[in-house]
Amino acid sequence: MNRRQLLKGAALAGGATAIGALQLPSAASAAPAGFPDYRYLGVPFNKSALRYNPTGELIFPCIRGVYDKISGGLGRYYLYYAPHEKPGGICLAYGNSLGGPFTEYAANPIISNVWSGHYSVSHVSSPHVIWSASNSKFYCYFHGENNTTRMAWSTDGVHYTYFGVVLSTAMVPGTTETSYARVFEHTVTGLGNKYVMLFMGVTGGTRKIFWGWSSDAKSWSFDPTPLVYPGPDGQTDISGAHLLKRNGTAYVVYHGNGGNQFITEVGNAFDREVHLGVFHPALSGAPDNGRAAAPSFGTDGGVEYMFYEAGQRLSATIAVARAV
């Protein structure tokens, strides 16, 4: 019995340059499944000049075009990101081109680790924002603590109202951590869903990619079986998953503990696990320094861009690569 049948039965950085000349990855080659090769372009802002940067480490970018969703926005594109570790904080930068530059929002963080009347945690991090066209709202998913993923909503993408917990270890049996969630519109036949969630779950001391499904992006069901395991990629831990569609099927891109990004075909029904190898190799030098993680993708003027977390933990920054 395959996973799909089981589901039916269960009734889901210092040294970086400013944006400019392209730099080749350390092992440049076209990505599997016909995806483009992304090459480092630069950084969206000067990390050392940020007003809010309590830990010196920035992670988990999420890039969103807002020009066709709201009027009077700060810019055409919003870039969400967060410091890692205590106290974290969901942050925003804005710009008019994916090629940059981006300007730090003056009142960061837009979501902090203490929200009066709702929670008080050591840190919040890993923002992922979607647009709900049915009610003209932005939904922001973020974790804090590492065993809990929360959601807040906004009409302008800047000022958020707390919604509540949407994922926790109590909802996925056997997990000791559930975090780094991203949400996408994707329908799986037979589940009555409109959205899927990809997230990192820890079981048996190792990190794997899990998934869930929802009809409204607020109330979720989860598959207790990992969607993608790290072993076939030669990794022990994987995280930062992003859903991509091409060739009439669905893929998951994520980073491994070795530093590179990998790609696995999961199929439109999320019933496959075909590991295809390295999607994007990390630069050996700055800003990656051997680690390119947590990708987020966007298109501007027909050109594809990838924002990602560049650098080793405790010193990472946000970087931008462009398809060539």
Image (tube, rainbow, N blue to C red):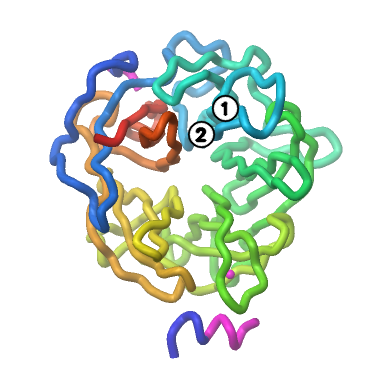
Residue 309 in percent (x, y) is at 39, 34
Q: Looking at the image, is 253 positioned above or below residue 152?
A: below
- Residue at 73%, 29% (x, y): give it: 156
Q: What is the span of residues highlighted in magenta in the rendered image?
A: 6-15
- Taking the magenta stretch, the answer to whether it contains residue 14 is yes
Q: Which residue is at the far right? A: 117
Is mark 2 in CB contact (under 8 Å) with mark 1? Answer: yes
Q: Amino acid at mark 1?
A: Tyr
Left or right? Give the position of 172 relative to 156: left
Q: In what element is the residue under mark 1? A: strand
Which circle's residue, 2 or 1, is located before the other in the chain? Answer: 2
Residue 49 in percent (x, y) is at 47, 8
Q: Which mark is residue 63?
A: 2
Left or right? Give the position of 255 relative to 127: left
Name the image quarter holding residue 15. Answer: top left
Q: Nearer the viewer, residue 133 or 257?
A: 133
Residue pointed to by mark 1: 78
- Taking the magenta stretch, the answer to whether it contains residue 215 is no
